[in-house]
Amino acid sequence: MPAVRSRTVNWRKSLEQLCERNGSLEIALPRYLTHTTSTDGFDESGSSLIWRVRLLELQEDGILIEQPSALGQTIHMDEGIDLVAIMAIGQNRWMFKTRITDHVRYTLNERRKIIAMRVDWPTKVERCQRRNFYRVSTVAISLPTVLAYPVLDAATIWAAEEDSRARMSMSSEALLRGDKLPDAHPVLPEVGPNIEGTLLNIGGGGIGLQVESECNGVVSNHRHFWLQMTLPPVIITPFGVAARLAHTHIDSTQAIYLGMQFDFSHSPQYKKFIIDQICKYVTETQREQLRRHREDMRGEQ
């Protein structure tokens, strides 16, 4: 049996080994096309956030994983919500569709209990092609683009944070009134030319970005960045956040992974603004999923 096929067939053994090593799964909320009769009708025009969550236990009736979090806050996901799960081992990735079946109290150790999510065992697991780690025949997710600007004067970050908050507030009010959205050119701190990255994952205190090898000069010479992004179709108004480069590594394709730690030292209350944007994205994406499920059920009756 070819090596690739062997690894795919033995995905369950790989999952067991990952669990024994206290490893993690990556999960994302898929977005579906609004008008389609196929449950595989993924909307690739929208953006999906990926969380890395701890793999807790493999049970007969499902897989237990921890709930995702951002900046120390648990991000609640409802029962019945579809997820895309990614199992990453080295440079290899396997993807599958699953669904949250329930939430259970789980004992991590004698001192700590948490609320975990139980998700369905997959019916099909596929290995991603190296050229596209997030697409297989039945699942595809699109990752957000982030513009990373090297900060030249940290004292100018506060004004950019205030502009982000004001612009988001004006956008929300405009949408409620049915008015045109405000100008999409946000205020920036004093920065140098940007590099473009892909948001690979979001964690407890920051994000992981992937940039091309030609960005190495900027990455080597700067440690403080202003990250600007949108999360379409939920959040189409650009917003930004300061971050410090915590670590880097180069993968087998020579792309550079940047571990970025959010920095709220200029305005500690800005942390809540960023959490609010992430929670808004999750809430709206789940709401759209549940609406789609109801439409599918009516179509089957």
Image: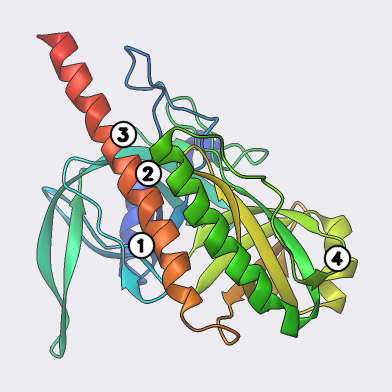
Instruction: Give the residue pinned by disc 2.
Output: 29
| 166 horizontally vs 292: left or right | right
Which of the marked residues, 1 or 4, is nearer the chain's N terminus?
1
Q: Which of marks 3 and 1 is in front?
A: 3
Q: How crowded is mark 2: few (under 14 residues within 10 Å), some or many (20 or more)?
A: many
What residue type is disc 2 on?
Leu
Instruction: Give the residue pinned by disc 1.
Output: 17
Q: Which of marks 4 and 3 is in front?
A: 3
Tell whether label 2 touches label 3 (CB within 8 Å): no
Instruction: Give the residue pinned by disc 4.
Output: 216
Q: Which colour scheme is used?
A: rainbow
Q: Which of marks 1 and 4 is in front?
A: 4
Place of residue 179 in the rendered image (x, y in percent of width and height, measured from the top left): 50, 34
Which of the marked residues, 1 or 2, is nearer the chain's N terminus?
1
Among the 4 quarters of the image, the one containing residue 272: bottom left
Instruction: Give the residue pinned by disc 3.
Output: 288
Q: Nearer the viewer, mark 1 or mark 2?
A: 2
Alpha carbons under labels 1 and 4: distance apart: 35 Å
What residue type is disc 1 on?
Gln
Give me the residue at 73% from left, 85% from top.
155
Q: Is mark 2 on a helix, strand or loop?
A: loop
Which of the marked residues, 4 or 3, is nearer the chain's N terminus?
4
Which of the marked residues, 3 or 2, is nearer the chain's N terminus?
2
